[in-house]
Amino acid sequence: MANKCPNCGAVLPVGGASSCSECGLLLGDRATQLGAVSDEQEKRIIQGVSGRLTENNRFLWKVSWRTFAWFFSLLGLAFGWGIWSAVEKLNGLATKRFDALDNNMSNLVVEANARIVTNIAGQFEEPRIRKIVGDVAANQAKHLLESEINPVVKRFREETNAKLEPLQSEAHAAAEEIATIRKRMETQGTIMNSVTGELANAKLVLEALAKENEKAKERLQEMEIYANSVGLLPDGRLLLGGNLTGRAWILEKGITNLATLFSAGRFKEAYGVAKDCVGRHEKTAEALKGITMSTGDVYINNDGLCQMYSLGALSARFFDENDIALNWARKAVAVKPTAQTKLILVTSLFNMHLENEAQLLIKATLDKGDKEAEEFKQLLSANGLQRKQ
């Protein structure tokens, strides 16, 4: 296989060579074998290499192109820096000049504006300009009236007429209805006149009836006086013109019913009957105040009243109506003071926490030492009560 120069790639002669015939490159092995190179040999080698490089167009092209590139790079750098500095200076000077020019122009614009305003104001003061302005305003107003206002007014008139047509129809119908009502009222007026005549006749009739009413009123007053003189009392007796008569049959029946219910243990019903009986008796007593005349067996005896109050008091206790029980117990003792009524009163006083009054009643009854006292003592013992020592 042929050997080639490692620098330029030229084919080396067979058998070896000390240098490349094309580029003059010293080959390593030969250089080592030959040892040091003399000055003449070095000079000849340099000339040979220079000649070969001069004849190598490719090498010359590469060297020329790179040299040219470096030259222009250095030249551009030098000129570019100068140009950039000049541009900066020019920008600074231009900015200053433009600022000064802007200030001058602003002053000129303000001054010109003031002069223009003054001139315009002066011009408007002249009669000729005023007339021109007035004519222009009139023309503009006329144009505005014809182009803007008149169409709106016309459209409004048309819309108003369109809305008024149904209203006019309704008004016409209302007018016809009013005329009909007027005719009806005229007819009713005729009827009212006729009614007025009838009312006049009726007034005469009413006056006659009023007189009859007065007579009837007098008769009713007489009957009321008689009715007041005859009345059924709550207990069943009759009051005839201040005279008491009859029997207290309602109260008697109530007391009998009270005893039956209490004996049967129907205490709730017994309590209701007792309240009715006591109410009838006390209302009758109130109505009989001032009545002194009586006929027949007109009074409830004390036994009946005592039974009414006693059983009523005992019935009231079952429903914790202790105040009512105490009130009726006192009235039972007032009607008929027996050992039994006093026992009911004593127990009612204890229920109302009136122990002192109860002990006083016990002492007063036992101190008598009679048959009633002995019976009372037995009743106290039977009910677990005793005299306080």
Image (cartoon, rainbow, N blue to C red):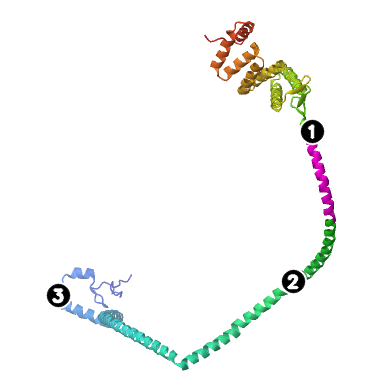
Tell us which disc is closer to us: 3 or 1.
1
Label 3 with label 1: CB-CB less than 8 Å: no
Quarter of the picture containing the N terminus is bottom left
**Residue 56 seen in this snapshot:** no
- Mark 3, secondary structure of its residue: loop
For mark 1, does the 10 Å Cα neighbourhood hold few (<14), some (14 to 19), or many (20 or more) residues? few
Residue with the mark numbered 1: 226
Question: Which amino acid, mark 2?
Answer: Ala
Q: Residue at x 55, y 13 (%)?
A: 360
Q: Report if residue 162 lies within the magenta region.
A: no
Question: Which amino acid, mark 3?
Answer: Ser
For mark 2, does the 10 Å Cα neighbourhood hold few (<14), some (14 to 19), or many (20 or more) residues? few
Label 2 with label 1: CB-CB less than 8 Å: no
Vertical relation: 317 (above or below) 338: below
**Residue 51 seen in this snapshot:** yes
Question: Which amino acid, mark 1?
Answer: Tyr
Q: Residue at x 61, y 20 (%)?
A: 326
Q: Position of residue 29 (x, y in %)?
A: 23, 68
Q: Which residues are magenta?
A: 201-224
Q: Position of residue 67 (x, y in %)?
A: 26, 80
Query: Which of the numbered marks, if any, corresponds to residue 38?
Result: 3
For mark 3, does the 10 Å Cα neighbourhood hold few (<14), some (14 to 19), or many (20 or more) residues? few
Q: Report if residue 217 lies within the magenta region.
A: yes
Residue with the mark numbered 2: 171
Tell us which disc is closer to us: 3 or 2.
2
- Mark 2, secondary structure of its residue: helix
Q: Residue at x 81, y 39 (%)?
A: 219
* Apparent side of residue 223 relative to residue 63 in the rendered image (left or right): right
Q: Nearer the viewer, residue 43 or 150?
A: 150
* Apparent side of residue 370 relative to residue 280 in the rendered image (left or right): left
